[in-house]
Image (cartoon, rainbow, N blue to C red):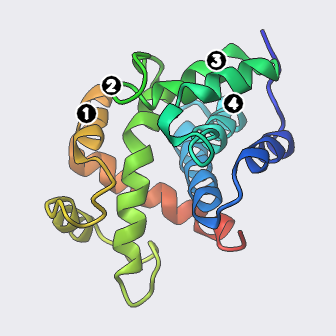
Amino acid sequence: MGIIPTREQAWELLTEYNSEHFHLKHAVTVEGVMRWFARDLGYGDEEDFWGIVGLLHDLDFEKYPDQHCVKSQEILRGRGIDERIVRATASHGYGLTVDIAPEHTMEKVLYATDELTGLIGATALMRPSRSVSDLELKSVRKKFKTPSFAAGCSREVITAGAEMLGWSLDDLISKTILAMRDCEDAYENI
């Protein structure tokens, strides 16, 4: 068993490799979403662990986009980070950059929600409130069906993630909206 960093240590590591506001906001958003799902799915005692995985999931993306989910394994292992974190963060690149299939519920949630948080966030920005607080499922579904909207958010990955979890796409989107509402204040000050 390796090191499980505190939230502060994970933030320091993240900011060592990431400085762009967009990437830091995304990391904090996914951290909050993962924490919400940990509580919602009965893993409340692992909430901090799920949050660290969410915070670090794109550790290598800003500096090493062509080695995403590959370089992060090297960085994390080089720091002695627990192998469960190494595997979980890498598994969200399954089928894209790595062959590490999400197995644990936490890994499946990360895989399913990573791209979805981007789509939901982009949809929220189109609203007068610019917030998820009043965002509804139907608005996200409408944007989901428009491939040119938030084109970098893979609908195939989101759909595959819902299937991995055994949830309908509507359930995944609805729960992720609730999770993002819960943590919206956390990323406002980044």
Q: Are discs 3 and 1 less than 8 Å apart at CB?
A: no
How many angstroms separate mark 3 from mark 1 (CA)?
Answer: 22 Å
How many angstroms separate mark 3 from mark 4 (CA)?
Answer: 16 Å
Q: Are discs 2 and 1 less than 8 Å apart at CB?
A: yes
Find residue 157 and report its horizontal and vertical position in percent. Answer: 29, 38
Residue found at the very far left of the displayed protein: 145
Which numbered disc, 3 or 4, marks the residue closer to the eye? 3
Find residue 110 and report its horizontal and vertical position in percent. Answer: 47, 36
How many angstroms separate mark 2 from mark 1 (CA)?
Answer: 11 Å
- Position above or below: 9 against 126: above
Residue 14 shown left or right of residue 99 in the figure: right
Residue 129 shown left or right of residue 3 in the figure: left
Q: Which residue is labeled 3 in the image?
A: 84
Q: Are discs 3 and 2 less than 8 Å apart at CB?
A: no
Q: How many neighbours does mark 2 have within 10 angstroms: few (below 14), some (14-19), or many (20 or more)?
A: few
Q: Judging from the image, what secondary structure is the residue with disc 4 in?
A: helix
Q: Which residue is labeled 1 in the image?
A: 160
Q: Are discs 1 and 4 less than 8 Å apart at CB?
A: no
Q: Nearer the viewer, residue 101 or 36?
A: 101
Which numbered disc, 2 or 4, marks the residue closer to the eye? 2
